[in-house]
Amino acid sequence: MELFKKNSSVWAVSVYLFSLVVVLSNINVVFASHNVFVDLQSSSAVSVKNVHRTGFHFQPPKHWINAPMYYNGVYHLFYQYNPKGSVWGNIIWAHSVSKDLINWIHLEPAIYPSKKFDKYGAWSGSATILPGNKPIILYTGVVDVHRAQVQNYAVPANLSDPYLTKWIKPDDNPLIVPDNSINKTEFRDPTTAWMGQDGLWRIVIGSLRKHRGLAILYKSRDFMRWVKAKHPLHSSANTGNWECPDFFPVSLKNTNGLDTSYRDENVKYVLKNSLDVTRFDYYTIGMYDIKRDRYIPDKNSTDGWKGLRLDYGNFYASKSFYDPSKNRRVVWGWTNESDVLPDDDIRKGWAGIQTIPRKVWLEPSGKQLVQWPVKELETLRKKKVQLNKKMLRKGEKVEVKGITPAQADVEVIFSFSSLDKVEQFDPKWADLYAQDVCTIKGSTVQGGLGPFGLATLASKNLEEYTPIFFRVFKAQKDYKVLMCSDAKRSTIRHNEAMYKPSFAGYVDVDLVDKKLSLRSLIDNSVVESFGAGGKTCITSRVYPTLAIHENAHLFAFNNGTETITIETLNAWSMGTLRMN
C-alpha cells in the first residue's frame, strides 16, 4: 500500500490485497491462481491446530487468507479472506488495523461481493488519498462466471472514524471496463495512483496479451472517468500474465522512502510484477519517461524469470507502501501453505500468512533493492544469547542454546581467512537457476568455502532441519556467492504432494573483507532469511514433526574445508504478537 506523503498538494496512500491461491507441482514452478475447491471452500474449521501456527507473523484466527495502508496515524491491512473455510473461495476484503505494524485489531470486513459489478468476486486493489485527505480504494470486481473483470471503487462511510471501519461501494461502479483489445479475464490489480506534471492521475493494471505481460496505463483528471493510454507503461514478451503490479520511485541519495507521486532528478523507478506463470515476484529498476509515459528498465535489469526477485522463496503478490511517519517504503508479501493439499489446510483450520513487513530501498550501486525487517519487530525480542569468535572447522557445528529455537530472531556474521579453497563454478550451471545449483550442491555436500550457515527448526539428532547457508564459487571473472534455504530435510513426514524445495539466489557482494552476514526470522513453520544485509532474501515454509515448540534446536555449521569463524552471533527468543 502506498502511504501518504505531501507532494505537489497530493497525499498518496496504497493498499494491496492478495487474491491468489497457489498450487505447487515441482521444485521450480508453481502453477494456477484462484483455484476454486467447490466442495471444500465452505468447510469450516471445527478447531484450529497450532502445531505450525506462527507466533509473530500476521494471520487471522482461522481459515484462508491470502496488504497495507497508512492513514491518520493508523496502519490498515486489507487482505483477501475466506470466512467460511481454509481454501480459496468465498473471498471478501477482511480488515485489520495497527499502530505499530506488529500488533493488530481485527475489524468487520471492508468489502464483500454484493452487487452486479463484483457479484462473482472482489479481488485485489490499491488505495489513494485524494486532495482533502480522502482515501479511495480501487479494486477488481468479477462480473460473471467466466471471470470477466472490471475495476471498481469504494470509499469510507465515515471519515471521522479513526479505523475507517465501514466502506461503501457506490452504484456508479464500475469505473473501468476493458475494451475489446484487452483480455477480460486477465485484467486486474490496479496500483496506487500517482499524479503527473499535467495534473492527471495515473494507474497501472496488470494484464496479458498472448504471451506478453502488460502494465496497462490509465489516466484521469477527476479519478472517476478513466481513459486507457495509447500504449502500456511497460510490457515484455514471453512473461505471461502480470499480477499485482507495483510502480514506485526510489532515492539515489539515501535509504528514505518516496511517495509514488514524488518527482525529482535523483530517483530511479521500480516496476514489480507477480508472474502468474512462475508464482514469484520479479522487479526491474529503470527510468520513467514522464513525457512519453514510458517505463524503461536499465540495460542490466531484465524482465521475467531471469530477472531480479524480491524474495527467492515462497513469496508472492507483494505490495509496497510509503510510510510518512517513518519516512520509509515498506514492502509486504504473502506466503502460502506448502503442505500442500487442501485437506491439510482444513485439518489445520487455517492457511496463508503475511511475511514480516520490510523496509525497502535502492542499493548504492543502483543495481538492486535491499530489504530489511521493520524496526518495530525488535520490540518482540525477549531473551538474548550471544556467541563470539567461535571457529568451525570442516564438519563441525555448534548449538545455539538458551533461547526458543522454534520462534527466534538470529543475526550472525561469518568470516574466513582465505579464498584459496573456493570451488570452481561449473560453466554448465550458467543456464540453471540458483535453486537448481543449490539442489546439486546441498548443505551436506562438502565444498571449499562453504556450505556454512544455520540449521533452523532442527530436531536433536538432525533427522529434521532447514539449513540456510552460503557457498562461494570462483567463476571466470569473479566470485559467485550462492545463498540457499533448503527444505528437503525439513520434515520426516512422508507426503509426495508436500513441497520441499531448495530455494536459492545469488548474493551480489564484495568479498574483500572476507565476511558474510545472515539474519533469519524463525517462526514455527516459516523461516525468512536476509543475506548480506538484505541484498538476497529467501522465505521458506516448512512443517517439522519432531522439531516443534520446545523440541526444536538451532545450530551453526560448516561443511566446507575452509575454516569459518562466527565473528558475532546474536539470537533472541521472540514473543507473540497481539491479535484482538
Image: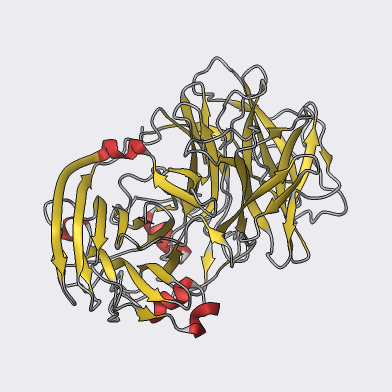
From the viewer's perspective, is residue 338 above or below residue 420? above
Residue 180 higher or lower than 480, as above or below: above
Whole-percent x and y of residue 510? 39, 61
Q: Which residue is rendered at x = 20% and y = 47% of the image?
A: 573
The residue nearer to you, when weighing 419 against 492, is 419
Is residue 341 at all visible to an observer of this figure? yes
Residue 479: % across, % down: 41, 71
Q: How is the image coloured?
A: secondary structure
* The one of 52 and 296 positioned closer to us in this rendering: 296
Q: Quadrant of residue 378?
A: top left
Farthest left residue?
Answer: 402
Quarter placement of the C terminus? top left
- Where is residue 20 drawn, in percent x and y? 57, 54
User: On the picture, is 504 further left or further right than 417?
Assistant: right
Is residue 145 in sight in this rendering?
Answer: no
> In the image, is 425 to the left or to the right of 282?
left
Up-down relation of residue 266 to residue 551 (above or below): above
Q: How many marks?
A: 0
Residue at 33 percent of width and 39 percent of height:
377
Q: Position of residue 555 (x, y in %)?
A: 19, 64
Please give the name of the residue rendered at 19% of the width and 57% of the height, measured from the top-left corner. 567
Residue most toward the top?
160
The residue that appears at 19% across and 60% down in the rendered structure is: 566
Q: Quadrant of the N terminus?
A: top right
In the image, is 2 to the left or to the right of 131? left
**Along the viewing direction, whichever of 261 and 187 lies nearer the viewer:** 261
Pick the front one: 567 or 56: 567
Say whether residue 409 is left or right of residue 199.
left
